């Protein structure tokens, strides 16, 4: 079993920065990739935000490229999402997902609210 726990969400003013964290635990010896998604209020689908492969390759959509950075602490498999120059439209529940041996495991999400 794999457990995924996010932390670090909160309130931040427009233009500010925030870092959210993700700590997977359990049988995580074969992590293939880690990713962040978000679900904005009133939207049914989660939006891809960032991903990092086991080799360290990262990918971002245009909406966050240059503002968001995904990184990983290899010592404890914790993955971070550093978010800069936040905008009100970044308000969402942010979810971490971890791919272990081909299967995705999701956390419960952490709320990020950006106010004007």
Image: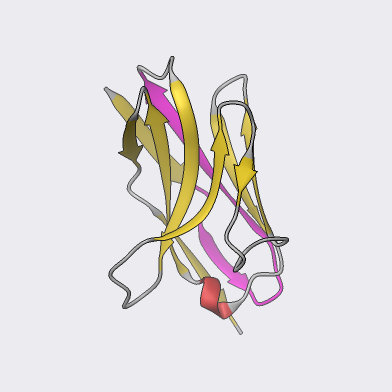
Residue 19 vs residue 29, the one in the foreground: 29
**Magenta-colored stretch includes residue 17:** yes
Q: In the rendered image of this protein, does residue 68 appear above or below residue 114? A: above
Q: Say whether residue 8 is left or right of residue 100.
A: right
Outermost residue on the bottom side: it is 116
Please name the colour scheme applied to the rendered image.
secondary structure
x 43%, y 17%: residue? 30
| Numbered range of the magenta stretch | 7-26
Quadrant containing the N terminus in the rendered view: top left
Q: Say whether residue 7 is left or right of residue 69.
A: left
Quadrant in which residue 25 is drawn? top left
Quadrant in which residue 71 is drawn? top right
Residue 28 coordinates in the image, percent (x, y): 41, 19
x 45%, y 24%: residue? 31
Q: In the rendered image of this protein, does residue 2 appear above or below residue 95? A: above
Residue 52 coordinates in the image, percent (x, y): 57, 38
Q: In the rendered image of this protein, does residue 39 appear above or below residue 60? A: below
Residue 89 coordinates in the image, percent (x, y): 53, 77
Quadrant containing the C terminus in the rendered view: bottom right
Q: Main secondary structure of the magenta part?
A: strand
Q: Say whether residue 46 is left or right of residue 112.
A: left
Total number of numbered labels? 0
x 56%, y 74%: residue? 114
Residue 64 vs residue 12, the one in the foreground: 64
Quadrant in which residue 103 is drawn? top left
């Amino acid at each position: 079993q794999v457990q995924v726990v996010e932390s670090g969400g909160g309130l931040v003013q427009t233009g500010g920065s925030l870092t959210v964290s993700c700590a997977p635990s359990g049988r995580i010896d074969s992590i293939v990739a880690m990713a962040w998604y978000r679900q904005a209020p009133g939207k049914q689908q989660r939006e891809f935000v960032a991903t990092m492969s086991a080799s360290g390759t990262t990918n971002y959509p245009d909406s966050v490229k240059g503002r968001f950075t995904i990184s990983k602490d290899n010592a404890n498999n914790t993955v971070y999402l550093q978010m800069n120059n936040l905008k009100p439209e970044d308000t969402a529940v942010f979810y971490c997902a971890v791919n272990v041996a081909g299967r995705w495991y999701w956390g419960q999400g952490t709320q990020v609210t950006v106010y004007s």
